Amino acid sequence: MRAGSGRPCALYGRRGGNKWIEAPCVLEGRPGGPTGQNASMTTLATAPASASTAPAGFIEKAPLERYVAPARPSLIGFSRLELMEALAGIGVPEGKRRMRAQQIWSWLYVRGVTGFEAMTSLSKELRALLAAHFTLARPEVVAEQISVDGTRKWLLRLPGERAGEAPHEVECVYIPDTDRGTLCLSSQVGCTLTCSFCHTGTQRLVRNLTAGEIVGQIMVARDRLGDWSAAHPGPGHPGTGEPADGQPGAGRRLVTNIVMMGMGEPLYNFEAVRDAILVVADGEGLGISKRRITLSTSGVVPNIARAGDEIGSMLAVSLHAVTDALRDELVPLNRKYPIRVLMEACRNYPGLSNSKRITFEYVMLKGVNDSLGDAHALVKLVRNIPAKINLIPFNPWPGTRYECSDWDEIEKFSEVVFTAGYASPVRTPRGRDILAACGQLKSASEKLSARERLALRAMAMTDD
Ligand code: SAH
Ligand code: SF4
C-alpha cells in the first residue's frame, strides 16, 4: 500500500498584489490491474513497474487497461447524435428521434436528473424502455472531503475490465473562488508518460476514461453541489415538468470553469476528451464555454493543432524547463517533441490573441530549474506567443528526488517573469486541510474494511 503522495490539487489564493502562482490539480491513481490496449496511445516501450526503473531513452509506457462497457450503458456523456442513435437502437421511430433526443438532452444536462422516471415530458412507455436499456449512472462517489474554505474533493470509482476485478479510482476537485468555481478533471487512470517529478507518471496502470466518465465528473460535482437549474436543485429533487429546452437554469452556477489538469494526458485520450468537451461546452446543456475550459498537455505536438481545430478550448502547456537537456529529463516526451517543435506548435495554436493566451506551466524544482537565468530564458522562449505563465510550487511525494524551490526563489523568479510583462500568479494554498494530504483520501479508502468503506460512502452521500 502506498502512502499518500502529496500530489498537488492545491489551488492557491492571492498573495501580494497582482502576482500569482497557481498549482494545478494533479490527481492520484493506483497501480496494479490487468493488461489491455488502446489504439489512440503511442507505445514506445513496455511498461516498467515505476518510472524510476525506466531504461534510458524510455518515454512512454504501454496502456494496460481497457474499458469494457457495462451491459446497460449510461447515457451520461452522450451527444445529441448519440442519443438519436440510442433511440434508434430501441425502436423509436425516425420522425420522433430528434425531438426525443433533445428532450432527453435537456433532462440530462440542464436539469441533471438521475432517473428516467423524472423525465416527465416523455411517455411512461418510453421511460420504461429507456430504463430497460440504459442508465444515468455517474462515476460512483466513494468519498468526499470538504475544506473549511469550500474546496471539495471527491474520490470516484470507475469500472475495471472484468466483473469482480478491482475498480479504478480517480479524484476530482472543486475549487470555489470569488468570481468562479473551477473543477479539475482527470482524463485517464494513470498516465502513459513518465515525467520524473510527477507521481502519476510512476503508476503502472493506465486506462483512458470514456467521454461519459469525463462528463460524469462534472455531473457528480453539480449533483453534490446542488448546482442544477432552480427547478432541480440537486440529487433527489427530480425536475417537475418540462425543462425549458435551451434555457440553462436560472441563477448563478457554482461550476463555471473546467481544467483538464487531473490525472492523465488529455491529448493521449483525444477523442474522448474532445467529445466530452463538446458536450460540456454546448450552450444549451452544461453550458461551460470553451473559454472557460483549459486543457493541459505535456506537449503531444501532433495533437495540439488538432485540439485547436477540433476542440477549441484554452490550452496549457507543461513546459517546466528551458533547455532540451533538462526537459528530456523532467518531461521525457521532450525527446520525441523537443522544445523548438513544441513552441512552434504553440505559436500556431488557432485563435491565439491577447484575450486567448496559452498558459505555460512551470513547476518550481529547487536547484533544478529555478535560477534567475532560467526565468530570463523562459520569458525569452515564450516571446511572440500570447502567453500566461503559471509558476507551480512542486508538491513532493514519497520517494521523489525533487524538492520545492524556496519561497524566496519563487518570488524572485516570479518578479523576472512579471517584469517581462507576464502575469505571474502567486497563490496561497486553498483547501489545505483536505489537500495537504492529497492522494491520501484514496490511499486511506484502500486500507479500509468493507464496513468502513460503506460508512465512508454513506458519509460521502450525506449533504452537509
Ligand atoms: N498530463 C497533463 C495534465 C495533467 S498534469 C500535463 O502534464 O500537462 C497537470 C499539471 O501538474 C502539469 O503541469 C504537471 O506537470 C503538473 N504536476 C505534475 N506533478 C506535479 C507535482 N508533483 N507538483 C507540481 N506540479 C505537478
Ligand atoms: Fe504527470 Fe502530466 Fe507527465 Fe502524465 S504527462 S506523467 S500526468 S505530468
Image: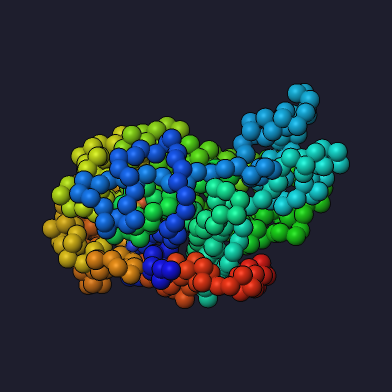
Q: Is residue 394 visible?
A: yes
Q: In which quadrant will I find the C terminus?
A: bottom right
Q: Is residue 61 left or right of residue 415?
A: right
Residue drawn at x 24%, y 39% is: 336
The answer to which of 418 and 104 lies nearer the viewer is 104
Residue drawn at x 77%, y 46% is: 116
The answer to which of 164 and 132 lies nearer the viewer is 164
What is the count of numbered marks?
Answer: 0
Residue at the far right in the pictured view: 124
Q: In which quadrant will I find the N terminus?
A: bottom left
Quadrant of the image occupied by residue 320: bottom left
- Residue 345 is situated, as x and y percent measured from the top left of the image, at 29, 36
Quadrant of the image occupied by residue 41: top left
Q: Is residue 263 left or right of residue 82?
A: left
Residue at the far top in the pictured view: 95
The answer to which of 110 and 117 lies nearer the viewer is 117
- Residue 42 is situated, as x and y percent measured from the top left of the image, at 35, 38
- Residue 306 is situated, as x and y percent measured from the top left of the image, at 39, 33
Q: Is residue 121 left or right of residue 357?
A: right
Q: Is residue 151 above or below residue 165?
A: below
Residue drawn at x 43%, y 58% is: 31
Q: Is residue 111 above or below residue 432?
A: above
Q: How is the image coloured?
A: rainbow
- Residue 33 is situated, as x and y percent measured from the top left of the image, at 47, 53
Residue drawn at x 15%, y 49% is: 325
Q: Is residue 22 visible?
A: no
Q: Is residue 15 above or below residue 113?
A: below
Q: Is residue 58 left or right of residue 183?
A: left
